[in-house]
Amino acid sequence: MPVIRNSVLIRCIPEEAFDYLSDHRAELEWNPKCELMEKVTDGPVGLGTKYRAKWKSSPLVDLETIAFDRPHSWTMHNGGPIEVTFTCRLEPVTGEGTRLHAEFEPKPHGWFRLIFPIFLLAARREEKTNMTHLRDALEQRTQPARPQED
Protein backbone atom coordinates (compact mmCIF):
# COMPACT_ATOMS: atom_id res chain seq x y z
CA MET A 1 0.00 0.00 0.00
CA PRO A 2 1.18 3.55 -0.66
CA VAL A 3 2.44 5.81 2.11
CA ILE A 4 2.17 9.60 1.84
CA ARG A 5 5.14 11.26 3.52
CA ASN A 6 5.55 14.96 4.30
CA SER A 7 7.62 17.07 6.62
CA VAL A 8 7.59 20.64 7.85
CA LEU A 9 9.80 22.81 10.04
CA ILE A 10 7.93 24.37 12.97
CA ARG A 11 9.40 27.19 15.07
CA CYS A 12 8.79 25.68 18.50
CA ILE A 13 10.28 23.03 20.75
CA PRO A 14 9.31 19.36 20.27
CA GLU A 15 7.32 19.26 23.54
CA GLU A 16 5.08 22.13 22.39
CA ALA A 17 4.50 20.51 19.00
CA PHE A 18 3.85 17.11 20.56
CA ASP A 19 1.40 18.32 23.21
CA TYR A 20 -0.64 20.31 20.71
CA LEU A 21 -0.65 17.95 17.74
CA SER A 22 -0.91 14.56 19.48
CA ASP A 23 -4.25 15.67 20.94
CA HIS A 24 -6.28 15.33 17.78
CA ARG A 25 -8.94 17.77 18.99
CA ALA A 26 -6.47 20.45 17.79
CA GLU A 27 -7.19 19.29 14.25
CA LEU A 28 -10.44 21.24 14.42
CA GLU A 29 -8.32 24.41 14.63
CA TRP A 30 -5.92 23.77 11.76
CA ASN A 31 -7.64 21.38 9.34
CA PRO A 32 -10.43 23.09 7.36
CA LYS A 33 -11.78 19.67 6.28
CA CYS A 34 -12.21 18.38 9.84
CA GLU A 35 -15.86 18.63 10.90
CA LEU A 36 -15.77 16.62 14.15
CA MET A 37 -13.00 15.47 16.47
CA GLU A 38 -14.37 14.33 19.79
CA LYS A 39 -12.29 12.61 22.50
CA VAL A 40 -14.35 9.68 23.80
CA THR A 41 -12.02 8.26 26.46
CA ASP A 42 -11.47 9.70 29.92
CA GLY A 43 -8.16 10.94 31.24
CA PRO A 44 -5.18 12.59 29.62
CA VAL A 45 -4.21 12.05 25.99
CA GLY A 46 -1.93 9.03 25.65
CA LEU A 47 -1.68 5.45 24.49
CA GLY A 48 -5.20 4.10 23.95
CA THR A 49 -6.91 7.51 23.67
CA LYS A 50 -9.89 7.25 21.35
CA TYR A 51 -11.67 9.86 19.26
CA ARG A 52 -14.77 9.97 17.07
CA ALA A 53 -14.05 11.95 13.92
CA LYS A 54 -15.50 13.13 10.65
CA TRP A 55 -13.96 14.98 7.74
CA LYS A 56 -15.78 16.45 4.73
CA SER A 57 -16.86 13.63 2.40
CA SER A 58 -16.06 10.93 4.99
CA PRO A 59 -18.22 8.78 7.23
CA LEU A 60 -17.95 9.00 11.00
CA VAL A 61 -14.89 6.97 12.11
CA ASP A 62 -13.25 5.94 15.37
CA LEU A 63 -9.55 6.72 15.87
CA GLU A 64 -7.24 5.24 18.47
CA THR A 65 -3.78 6.26 19.62
CA ILE A 66 -1.74 3.07 19.14
CA ALA A 67 1.72 4.51 19.91
CA PHE A 68 2.64 7.45 22.14
CA ASP A 69 6.23 8.43 22.96
CA ARG A 70 6.33 12.03 24.22
CA PRO A 71 7.93 14.18 22.78
CA HIS A 72 9.18 12.01 19.91
CA SER A 73 6.27 10.34 18.09
CA TRP A 74 2.69 9.11 18.10
CA THR A 75 0.58 6.92 15.83
CA MET A 76 -3.17 6.97 15.23
CA HIS A 77 -5.26 4.30 13.53
CA ASN A 78 -8.82 4.25 12.23
CA GLY A 79 -11.05 1.85 10.34
CA GLY A 80 -13.76 2.58 7.80
CA PRO A 81 -13.85 2.38 4.00
CA ILE A 82 -10.29 3.70 4.15
CA GLU A 83 -8.30 2.31 7.05
CA VAL A 84 -5.57 4.80 7.94
CA THR A 85 -2.46 4.58 10.06
CA PHE A 86 -1.02 8.04 10.68
CA THR A 87 2.39 8.49 12.33
CA CYS A 88 4.16 11.70 13.32
CA ARG A 89 7.79 11.91 14.40
CA LEU A 90 9.32 15.06 15.85
CA GLU A 91 13.00 15.90 15.50
CA PRO A 92 14.67 18.91 17.15
CA VAL A 93 16.55 21.16 14.73
CA THR A 94 19.18 23.22 16.54
CA GLY A 95 18.47 26.93 16.35
CA GLU A 96 15.42 26.46 14.12
CA GLY A 97 12.73 24.51 15.99
CA THR A 98 11.25 21.10 15.28
CA ARG A 99 10.93 19.09 12.10
CA LEU A 100 7.69 17.15 11.93
CA HIS A 101 7.74 14.02 9.75
CA ALA A 102 4.27 12.67 8.93
CA GLU A 103 3.31 9.34 7.34
CA PHE A 104 -0.25 8.80 6.13
CA GLU A 105 -0.83 5.16 5.18
CA PRO A 106 -4.30 4.56 3.69
CA LYS A 107 -5.69 1.10 2.94
CA PRO A 108 -8.98 0.93 1.00
CA HIS A 109 -11.70 -1.63 1.72
CA GLY A 110 -14.73 -2.81 -0.20
CA TRP A 111 -16.14 -0.59 -2.92
CA PHE A 112 -13.66 2.17 -2.03
CA ARG A 113 -10.90 0.24 -3.82
CA LEU A 114 -12.53 1.30 -7.10
CA ILE A 115 -12.00 5.02 -6.48
CA PHE A 116 -8.84 4.72 -4.38
CA PRO A 117 -6.49 6.05 -7.10
CA ILE A 118 -8.53 9.27 -7.27
CA PHE A 119 -8.63 9.50 -3.46
CA LEU A 120 -4.86 9.06 -3.34
CA LEU A 121 -4.25 11.99 -5.70
CA ALA A 122 -6.42 14.27 -3.57
CA ALA A 123 -4.95 12.95 -0.30
CA ARG A 124 -1.40 13.72 -1.42
CA ARG A 125 -2.34 17.36 -2.08
CA GLU A 126 -4.34 17.67 1.14
CA GLU A 127 -1.65 16.16 3.35
CA LYS A 128 0.96 18.53 1.91
CA THR A 129 -1.36 21.50 2.49
CA ASN A 130 -2.10 20.26 6.02
CA MET A 131 1.58 20.63 6.90
CA THR A 132 1.31 24.36 6.26
CA HIS A 133 -1.97 24.64 8.20
CA LEU A 134 -0.69 22.86 11.28
CA ARG A 135 2.63 24.74 11.22
CA ASP A 136 0.86 28.09 11.06
CA ALA A 137 -1.62 27.18 13.83
CA LEU A 138 1.10 25.89 16.13
CA GLU A 139 3.44 28.82 15.55
CA GLN A 140 0.62 31.27 16.31
CA ARG A 141 0.09 29.51 19.66
CA THR A 142 3.75 29.32 20.66
CA GLN A 143 5.33 32.55 19.37
CA PRO A 144 5.28 35.60 21.62
CA ALA A 145 3.02 38.38 20.39
CA ARG A 146 4.88 41.05 18.43
CA PRO A 147 4.09 44.69 19.06
CA GLN A 148 2.11 46.27 16.25
CA GLU A 149 3.81 48.99 14.28
CA ASP A 150 2.04 52.29 13.70
Image: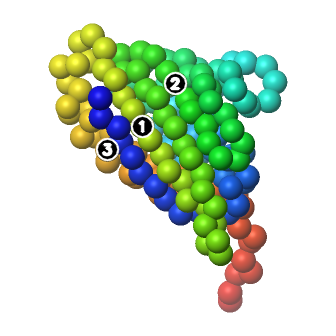
Q: Earlier in the sequence, mark 3 or mark 1?
A: 1
Name the foreground residue: 130 vs 18.
18
Distance from the alpha carbon under mark 1 to that under mark 2: 10 Å
| For residue 49, above or below residue 137 | above
Disc 2 target residue: 77
- Left or right of residue 105, residue 117 in this image: left
Q: Please give the name of the residue rendered at 35% of the width and 38% of the height, measured from the top-left corner.
A: 3
The kind of residue on which mark 3 rests is Arg
Distance from the alpha carbon under mark 2 to that under mark 3: 18 Å
Callout 1–callout 2 Cβ contact below 8 Å: no
Instruction: Please give the count of numbered marks on the rendered protein.
Output: 3
Disc 3 target residue: 124
x%, y% of residue 109?
31, 14
The kind of residue on which mark 2 rests is His
Disc 1 target residue: 104
Q: Please give the name of the residue rendered at 39% of the width and 32% of the height, measured from the top-left corner.
A: 105
- Left or right of residue 46, residue 27 in this image: left
Mark 3 falls on what kind of element?
helix
Callout 3–callout 1 Cβ contact below 8 Å: no
- In this orientation, does residue 110 appear? yes
Mark 1 falls on what kind of element?
strand
Name the foreground residue: 20 vs 77.
77
Distance from the alpha carbon under mark 3 to that under mark 1: 9 Å
Q: Earlier in the sequence, mark 1 or mark 2?
A: 2
x%, y% of residue 70?
72, 42
x%, y% of residue 103?
44, 41
- In this orientation, does residue 11 appear? no
Q: Please give the name of the residue rendered at 64% of the width and 61% of the height, measured from the top-left corner.
A: 92
The kind of residue on which mark 1 rests is Phe
